[in-house]
Amino acid sequence: MVTIFSLVIIFLVGLLIYKKYNPQTTLLLGGIIMMAAAIIFSTGTPLPENISSGNQWLDIFTFLKNTTAKTVGTLGLIIMAVGGFAKYMDHIGASRALVNIAIKPLGYFKAPYLVMALGYIMGQILNIFIPSASGLGLLLMVTLYPILVRLGVSKMSAVAVIATAACLDLGPASGNVNLAARTADIPVTEYFISYQLPVAIATMVTIATLHFFVQQWFDRRTTTNDNVELQTEEIQVAPPAWYALLPIIPLALIMIFSPMAIATVKIDVVTAMFISIAVAMVCEGIRHGAKPIFKDILVYFDSMGKQFARVVTLVIAGQVFAHGMKVIGLLDTVINFAINASVSPALMIILMVIIITFAAILMGSGNAPFFSFAAMVPDIADKVGINAVVMLMPMQLASGIARSMSPITGAIVAVAGVADVSPFELVKRTAIPMIGALIVSTTMSLILGL
């Protein structure tokens, strides 16, 4: 009875999110309903007795308060700092300077589809420094897209490659990466270097290779010649080329002050972001004077607020939803079923990857499903006898990969809109490379992790 009730709630939550209801409210409501049901059916309590408010019904909201306070001061602060930094880099033109320099060498190649494949790899590397999938996609639409079109790549092929440029969510600047590292209780640099990077390299090569062949196959089947270059209008004066160094500073600081280099000094992501913002402000002050930088720093703070409203609240809502599933007993039911059925760790990982893949496609987001499921992974991993990071990493990669197959994803819609193509036609072109990426990333994760 309780299990059926839980599954109905989960189905309704997924349905409401698919129908574009606010995911934060939907997840919070689902979590609260399941916690209330846990009290009614006596399957669990929202809080342990030692930290309870004294009333189980009040504990539902006490848990919400405790979760909010903990998240905002830890992972939430990282997400806000990273989001604000990315927006400020875009505002001062540093992101565009980095993209321009990175893309320029591709113009010297004369093999259209080779340039296209290399363009994907370049875009994925840039994603480490420009974590916004939509933002990076739009930057590539005004830099890489014209190069590909001039070389003879079709409009749809060029847009398909650009739409998947951030599919792996790489590096310490990614919110999903920080959540995975924190949930696995390891430093974000260790997660990126030791776990994510080896799998990502193999997956990137797979995606680039599949794009090379798949887009040619689609182009041979399409006879229309609809190549057009984007008519872009420069609104601001182009920044100096050395501004390309500014977006790299946080990653450089995190890598330098880590066990890989200087182990005696420790620096976290937020501190690296604050230092980098200070350096960028000095550079802006030298170029434009003091008054503009006093005004422009509001771009950073406004973006931090937006990250709280759009992303941090989603993390909190996902944790409440996951806790609801836990206290109502659904998580224990699933785990016990898997254990009793002698499900191997590899099969459990594959099952979680499949679940998060379908959720990401339906939700059109990599954040929403990963934030929803990540909190329960340590318990599941512990019960099947593996390290949490071994399960978290393929799930984290799958959430970004699957997002690139959804026609309602922000990055897909954004680049499709700029190129004036259908998002539904676009995901037909991204589906095969992304399915290949899912297979390779999951397989590599199993080989290296188990």
Image: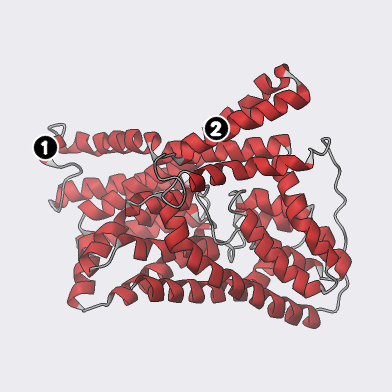
Residue at left 51%, top 40%? 310
Q: Is residue 203 above or below residue 79?
A: below
Nearest the eye: 443 or 100:
100
Q: How many labels does the image show?
A: 2
Tell me if label 2 and label 1 are in contact, CB under 8 Å: no
Q: Seen in the image, is 385 located left or right of residue 199?
A: left
Residue 47 in picture, x, y percent from top left: 18, 41
Q: Residue at x 12, y 51 (%)?
A: 42
Measured Cα–Cα span from mark 2 to mark 1: 40 Å
* Tag 1 residue: 50
Spot occupied by residue 312 in the image (x, y as percentages of width and height) = 45, 40
Amino acid type at mark 1: Asn
Q: Is residue 132 above or below residue 119?
A: above
Q: Name the residue under label 2.
A: 275
User: Which residue occupies 71% across, 70% down?
Assistant: 117
Compared across the picture, whether 398 is left or right of 373 comes to right
Residue 261: where, in percent of width, then height? 47, 49
Q: Which amino acid does label 2 sit on?
A: Ile
